[in-house]
Amino acid sequence: MLHYIKQQLFIEKVSCLDLVKTYGTPLYAYSRNYIQDAFLNYTHTFSVSNPLICYAVKANSNLSILRYLAHLGSGFDIVSGGELQRVLLAGGDAKKIIFSGVNKNEQEIKLALTAGILCFNIESLPEIDRIQKVAKEINVIAPVSFRINPDVDAKTHPYISTGLQNNKFGISYQDTLHAYTYAQKQSHLTIVGIDCHIGSQLLDLTPLKEAADKIFELVVQLKQKGIILKHIDLGGGIGIPYQENEKSPDYADYAKHIAPFFKANPEIQLIFEPGRSIIGNAGVLLTKVDFIKHNQNKNFIIVDAAINDLLRPALYDSYHDIIPVTLNKDLHPIQADVVGPVCESGDCLGKNRILSVQAGDYLAIKSAGAYTASMASHYNSRLIAPEILIDEKTHKIIRSRDTFEQLIQNETPFL
Ligand code: LLP
């Protein structure tokens, strides 16, 4: 979806130069075709297990993206009442919504029960009581599943690793039977599934396969106790290449590993909760080079995007490829840090990059579709950048740039 034609960067058939001239910078731009291909890759590769794909809204929660995924048949994995309202507003089917997260408050639970979601992924024993209480109050039966912590090392960044005993997520593996039998006794709960999510940006399938096997063992044990499940949710977590030497995991290999279980248990539906692998490489963040600064020992390419637009490098030391929008063959390449205007030394979007650019040029920061706009902030009173969606030759704005008035609208001057 991202390619050069005649020395100029294109997304699908749209020139990035035209985009920055039309909408200004910083600017998030997403390819609709890429999102579609990434979504269909899941449904096709795992077709033998007839999966329900519940897109993880936190990766990118723009209403137009959600609407498009709903149109493709996607379900949604949500973690707050805000995400629930977004999905419903975008036309998502409540019956395909899974509510994850370690602390859903009573109001959020009520909202989800009223909407009629597919299930709650319960993450602790006290949460059973909370959901039972709310369901009883409004006299409905709450469908529940348990997020089990399989104690598998995802071998990813510690901040995005979730499947180990010392992580806050999920019910301990050894407490599984207790959790299910306790939930079974509740008057307003019905057990529908089991879930795990061990972390994000996994490029190696080994931990995902290990976690799946541990969940399958539990499903067998639960069946022996008379607890029959309708679905197994294997979470999200499949990684994407952020640089040339990285490769997506082999989906077909993963599908082959889990298919025998689902073939043997055709009544059980497979669910995935992917976020990054659907939208991550569908997007770029376009930014303008404002200055080239030469310090004694270091060069800086100062751009107009910053950590408030792309927090990942500062938070996880993560790498995003950065390429010029137009190729400057006549310029000498320099080695430089690509930095933004925010007053923090951590406001660095790329360290020691070799780039041929001059002031006035534009750069594309790649793999910026997931956990980028959705993690943006107003830090330094900066305005959140606009988002556009590209479909072949057309592009349209799906979030306009904030105005200063919006930035301060909830504040009251204290006199
Ligand atoms: N399901 C649950 C319960 C999750 O917590 C997550 C992500 C997902 C699904 C989707 O995972 P994915 O397929 O996107 O890996 N901000 C971090 C990533 C945090 C992931 C949080 N949970 C980053 O920028 O790398």
Image (cartoon, rainbow, N blue to C red):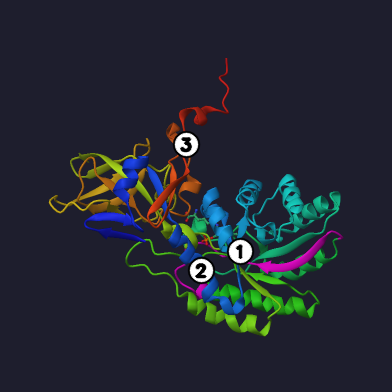
Q: Disc 3 marks which residue?
A: 378
**Ligand 1 is within 8 Å of the C-beta of the residue at disc 3:** no
Q: Disc 1 marks which residue?
A: 165
The stretch in magenta equals: 187-207
Residue 352 lies left or right of residue 106; in this view the side is: left
Mark 3: which amino acid? His
Total of numbered circles in the picture? 3
What quarter of the picture does the N terminus occupy?
bottom left
Q: Residue at x 29, y 47 (%)?
A: 17
Q: Camera-side residue: 116 or 176?
A: 116
**Kind of element beneath mark 1:** loop
Mark 3 burial class by Cα count in 10 Å: few <14, some 14-19, many 20+: few
Q: Residue at x 70, y 60 (%)?
A: 95
**Kind of element beneath mark 2:** helix
Circle 2 or circle 3, nearest the eye: 2
Q: Residue at x 85, y 64 (%)?
A: 185
Q: Residue at x 53, y 50 (%)?
A: 64
Q: Is residue 65 visible?
A: yes
- CA separation in Å, label 2 and label 3: 35 Å
Q: Earlier in the sequence, mark 2 or mark 3?
A: 2
Q: Camera-side residue: 102 or 16?
A: 16
Q: Disc 2 marks which residue?
A: 40
Residue 389 lies left or right of residue 87; in this view the side is: left
Q: Camera-side residue: 387 or 180?
A: 387
Circle 1 or circle 2, nearest the eye: 2
**Ligand 1 is within 8 Å of the C-beta of the residue at disc 2:** no
- CA separation in Å, label 1 and label 2: 34 Å
| Quadrant of the image occupied by residue 300 | top left
Is 377 covered by the magenta stretch?
no
Mark 2: which amino acid? Leu
Residue 99 image label:
none
